Amino acid sequence: MPRLAKWICTLAHPNLTAAIALLLLLGVVAGMPAAAQAQPRVLVYTRNYTSDGKGYVHDNIADSVAAIKKMGAEKGFAVDVSDNPTTFTEANLKQYAALIFSNSNNEAFSSDAQRSAFKHYIQAGGGFVGIHSASGSERDWPYFQSVLGGKFVVHPRMQQFTVQVADPAFPAVKGLPAQFTWTDECYFIDHLNPDIHPVLVTDRTKLTGLDAIKIDVAAFPNPLPLAWYHQFDGGREFYLALGHNKEDYANPILYGIIENGILWAMGATK
């Protein structure tokens, strides 16, 4: 940069002041790669509480946040993290290529104005990613359920089950084996948006401990969706029900699914 400044000053007419030369320099720099160097940003949101301050908080949140920050460093996007609902204003959300609800739960927002900002963000073409307990956020707001793709109901005890790839062409699961064994909470989710495209599923009849959860298992689809994508109300949305165990955020399978899901929601991949 000093060489460029010296070159401009050398070419400048003797009567040009140093201030004018500096302005020329700034003009050259502004027309160069400044815009190209700007990184897209994502917001990782982790609020878990109800209005009275209660709520189960997953111990995997710190690991999920660390993993997403690593993804950003690797793939060239900046990562902001918050559990404060005041983050949700229309002006603030405009800076983000995607909102990532990572193991959020209960009341994501504390006002209708925040809900409105979220809705307008989606309608403006924003990206959305929900991870694991995000399907338990905003349980009384149908619009959020439609964005995420469904609403958490219950899960049987932690167990090992087989995950099948239902759409191997989708970027988030591309390259995964056709099926793999996984240990997790297997979520039963209702209010499924008919627009969702499942990409990971499991045979719910092979799960154990279903009697203990006291639901009509037959009311849920089989195979049971575990991850899906859709484009709802102008936005790009991806949801992954897996991810209860904090150590799994370093597992290449879960890590890759989340990373590629984020990139898709941002519009970086088709």
Image (cartoon, rainbow, N blue to C red):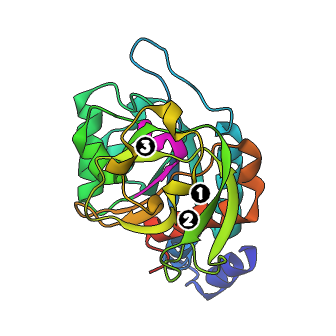
Residue displayed at 48% across by 33% down: 213
Compare residues 159 and 171 and report the one nearer the observer: 159
Query: Alpha-carbon distance for marks 3 and 2?
Result: 29 Å
Give the structural element (helix, strand or loop) at label 3. helix
Residue displayed at 50% across by 64% down: 201
**Mark 2 near mark 1, Cβ–Cβ under 8 Å?**
yes
Q: Is residue 141 left or right of residue 166?
A: left
Instruction: Tally the marks.
Output: 3
Above or below, comparing residue 262 to residue 62 in the picture: below
The disc label shown at residue 241, or none? none
> Where is residue 58 drawn, in percent x and y?
62, 32
Q: Quadrant of residue 224?
A: bottom left
Q: Quadrant of the C terminus?
A: bottom left
The disc label shown at residue 39, or none? 2
| The magenta stretch spans residue 135 | yes
> Where is residue 212 drawn, in percent x and y?
52, 31
| The magenta stretch spans residue 195 | no
Q: Which residue is mark 3?
A: 135
Q: Earlier in the sequence, mark 2 or mark 1?
A: 2
Which region is colored magenta? 128-136
Q: Residue furthest top?
A: 52
Q: Quadrant of residue 208?
A: top right
> Where is residue 227 drawn, in percent x and y?
48, 60
Above or below, comparing residue 155 to residue 128 in the picture: above
Q: Quadrant of the N terminus?
A: bottom right
Q: Look at the image and tell me whether residue 63 can be seen.
A: yes
Identify which amino acid the numbered label 2 is placed on: Gln
